[in-house]
Structure formats: structure tokens, C-alpha cells
Image (tube, grey):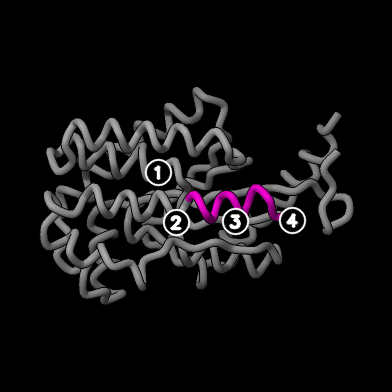
């Protein structure tokens, strides 16, 4: 049995999933603080490809996705090896199932690059632990655009609404596929909702996770 340093609670790995601007990082921070779990964040601030990507998606799509895949693999390898529970802001599965798939469908990534990318992902993921829970956050494109503009990252100010819509469709498709493949999904609508202000909503999520810890422990053979 896999006890961790939390005593009678089994080690869990939770991933926060969702479109750009939906509130993943904020929820990751809050849950990490409440649960006292280690948090892993998406590498965006010092990512050298993000700004060039939004200026020229044809040229930089493959480079950007390889950069994210490499960083995410490193993070999830650490999560797999870490003895306690962890929470991650966006999982490695989203890199291939959402972003690479959408960029390929829109013609920004060639067939050859996309196939090579998927082969690399499939090799990597065999070595990683699958999330015990994916918390999927969703909101309307209008809400996403408002949040993206308000947080003021220069390279995000030119994100196309159509791109956000395509990502949203990809998320819905993947979530259905993930459930069919035995991923546990918790879907949360974040429309007009700020978890820093909506304490009751945050508590419901925390309580859900803590109950899951107990159930996980009780269900271990």
C-alpha cells in the first residue's frame, strides 16, 4: 500500500485543466495552500517561444509544443517520484490532445511534425503516473477574453477568439474521450466566478478532494 507523509491518506495526483484564461493557476495555488500539497505550474513567464508563437503561429507551433512537452514531462516525472500528493497546472495530456491537435487541424503544424510529436508523447507518457483526478474548468470565450485582457500579458493580447473557440471544442472532445478511458473528471463552470472571492465554491472542491483521499485509501487492496 502506498502511504505518504500525510499518514492515513494515499498519495494523489490532481491536474487542473482548461482553456487559456479560465483560472487554472489561481485554483492550483489555492488548492495547494489549502491541502498543503506541492504545486507544479505551467512554464509561461520565461518561455522563449510564446511571444514569437502568437506573432507567427506557422513558424513557431512545433517549437513551442516541444518546449512545453519537455517541461511538462520533467514536472510529471517529478510528480511520479515525489512521495506526497501533488497538484499540477495543466497536464501533459493537454499538450497533445488540445494544443498540438488544434494547431495541426488549423494547419499551423505539418502532418510530419504532428506525427513525430505524437510519437514522442506516447513514448514519454508510458513512464508517467496518470492523474487520479482532472479538474476541468470551463467558461465562455467572452469570459476568457476578458480575463486574458485583464491580466495584461503582452504576448496574449493578440490571441484570436477563433483560436480560443477551437481550443474549447478540443477540450470538450478530449474530456469525453478521457472519461471513456477511465480518467476521473470533475467539471466546474467558472463563468463569473473567482475562487479567491467565492470561498464556498472553493471549499466544495477542497472537501471533494479530501473525501477522495479517504476513498482512495479505503479502496486500496
Residue 169 picture location, percent across and down: 28, 38
Mark 2, residues whose alpha carbon is within 10 Å: few (<14), some, or many (≥20)? Answer: some
- Residue tagged 4: 84
- Residue tagged 2: 71
Residue 184 picture location, percent across and down: 58, 35
Alpha-carbon distance for marks 2 and 1? 13 Å
Residue 145 picture location, percent across and down: 23, 62
Alpha-carbon distance for marks 1 and 3? 15 Å
Magenta segment includes 79: yes
Q: Residue at x 51, y 37 (%)?
A: 125
Query: Looking at the image, do the residues carrying marks 1 and 3 touch, with CB atoms under 8 Å apart?
Result: no
Region rendered in magenta: 73-82
Alpha-carbon distance for marks 2 and 4? 21 Å
Please give the label number shown on residue 66: none
Q: Earlier in the sequence, mark 1 or mark 3?
A: 3
Q: Quadrant of residue 200?
A: bottom right
- Residue tagged 1: 94
Alpha-carbon distance for marks 3 and 4? 10 Å
Amino acid at each position: 500500500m502506498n502511504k505518504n507523509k500525510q499518514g492515513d491518506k494515499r498519495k494523489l495526483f490532481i491536474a487542473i485543466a482548461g482553456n487559456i484564461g479560465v483560472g487554472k493557476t489561481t485554483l492550483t495555488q489555492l488548492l495547494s495552500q489549502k491541502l498543503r500539497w506541492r504545486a507544479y505550474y505551467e512554464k509561461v513567464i520565461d518561455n522563449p517561444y510564446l511571444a514569437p508563437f502568437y506573432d507567427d503561429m506557422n513558424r513557431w507551433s512545433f517549437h513551442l509544443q516541444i518546449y512545453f512537452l519537455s517541461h511538462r514531462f520533467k514536472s510529471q516525472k517529478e510528480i511520479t517520484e515525489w512521495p506526497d500528493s501533488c497538484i499540477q497546472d495543466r497536464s501533459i495530456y493537454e499538450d497533445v490532445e488540445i494544443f498540438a491537435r488544434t494547431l495541426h487541424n488549423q494547419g499551423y503544424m505539418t502532418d510530419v511534425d504532428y506525427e513525430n510529436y505524437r510519437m514522442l508523447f506516447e513514448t514519454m507518457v508510458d513512464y508517467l503516473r496518470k492523474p487520479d483526478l482532472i479538474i476541468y474548468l470551463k467558461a465562455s470565450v467572452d469570459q476568457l477574453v476578458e480575463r486574458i485582457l485583464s491580466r495584461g500579458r503582452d504576448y496574449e493580447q493578440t490571441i484570436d477568439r477563433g483560436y480560443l473557440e477551437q481550443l474549447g471544442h478540443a477540450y470538450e472532445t478530449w474530456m469525453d474521450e478521457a472519461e471513456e478511458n477511465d480518467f476521473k473528471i470533475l467539471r466546474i463552470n467558472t463563468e463569473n466566478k473567482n475562487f479567491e472571492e467565492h470561498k464556498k465554491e472553493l471549499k466544495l472542491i477542497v472537501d471533494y478532494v479530501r473525501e477522495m483521499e479517504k476513498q482512495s485509501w479505503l479502496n486500496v487492496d
